[in-house]
Image (spheres, rainbow, N blue to C red):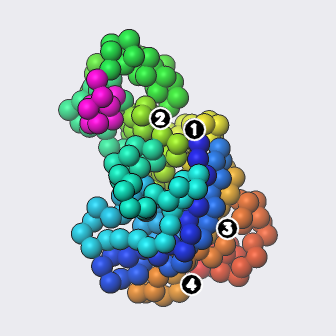
Amino acid sequence: MAKRIDAVDLNVYYGSFLAVQDVNIRIEPRAVTAFIGPSGCGKTTFLRTINRMHEVLPGAYADGKILLDGDNIYDAGVDPVTIRAEVGMVFQRPNPFPTMSIRENVLAGYKLNGTRLSKSDADAILEKSLRGANLWNEVKDRLDKPGSGLSGGQQQRLCIARTVAVEPSVILMDEPCSALDPISTLAVEDLINQLKEDYTVVIVTHNMQQAARVADKTAFFNIQGTGQPGQLIEYADTKTIFQNPENEQTLNYISGRFG
Ligand SMILES: Nc1ncnc2c1ncn2[C@@H]1O[C@H](COP(=O)(O)OP(=O)(O)OP(=O)(O)O)[C@@H](O)[C@H]1O
Ligand SMILES: [Mg+2]
């Protein structure tokens, strides 16, 4: 299931503005990779190129390659909708569909792509996904109640269940805990640890303790000034990034001396 991601000579634009420059990185399957760096350095922008979400904005595009187990997702003829199913995304704020029940939320991906499921298949996917998101025990007696009635942390796990329900290879998470309290954050971090057994997981976080807790590898991005493009500065095992980085910019950032 889990696939390797390679970005090759990737440049990402909003119209004529180069937001992210020349990224080359190999992201390993069955591991958690964290993206860290100051606001505006392009973490979200780069993340959204990995499932072809970036290009939905008018004028936004990327050049270079993103390879999923060697296949370029930007090749002519590749359907972005297929890529978005294979590379799932969890957003900063939990965004369950407010009018849908917990059950409908988890199965929403199937409804959206027009797949009809038998009742028994749907029930099996529902339970497996909610168990996979560490949420089953908390919601199994209220599956037909609205998803919006859950706590913030439960809603975020519901969104993760919705993402894993369609069996992606990769899960991208953009600051998934930034709207959560510390207890819910730990629950989601536990879950991220489990998810890496089956998926390639990429997480953007501003919380360095979180990166240190959950990530096997960490990529530090930076910008040299306003209007300049974001660049990948250093990429290594998380321990190396936090304890013994090679680049002075990384050291300044992780030690809070960022100017
Ligand atoms: N829709 C957009 N149109 C034009 N420029 C954009 C757009 N979204 C982001 N940018 C610009 O692209 C650059 C990178 O932004 P991005 O949101 O990727 O940064 P980030 O590292 O995710 O920051 P943060 O930590 O604040 O979330 C910034 O200069 C930003 O202003
Ligand atoms: Mg961002």
Magenta run includes residue 111: yes
Quadrant of the image containing the N terminus: top right
Q: Could you tell me the amino acid type at mark 2?
A: Glu
Q: Is mark 1 within 8 Å of ligand 2?
A: no
Residue 22 location (% of width, % of height): 54, 78
Residue identifier under label 2 = 167
Magenta run includes residue 246: no
Is 13 located above or below residue 167 in the figure?
A: below
**Are circles 2 and 3 on residues that touch, CB within 8 Å?**
no
The label on residue 64 is none
Q: Nearer the viewer, residue 258 or 131?
A: 131
Q: Which residues are magenta?
A: 107-116
Looking at the rendered image, the disc whose residue lies closer to the viewer, 3 or 4, is 3
Q: Could you tell me the amino acid type at mark 3?
A: Tyr
Mark 3 or mark 4: which comes first in sequence? 3
> Between marks 3 and 4, how big is the CA–CA gap?
21 Å
**Are circles 1 and 2 on residues that touch, CB within 8 Å?**
yes
Crowd rating for badge 2 (residues with CA inside 10 Å; few <14, some 14–19, many 20+) = some
Q: Nearer the viewer, residue 231 or 224?
A: 231
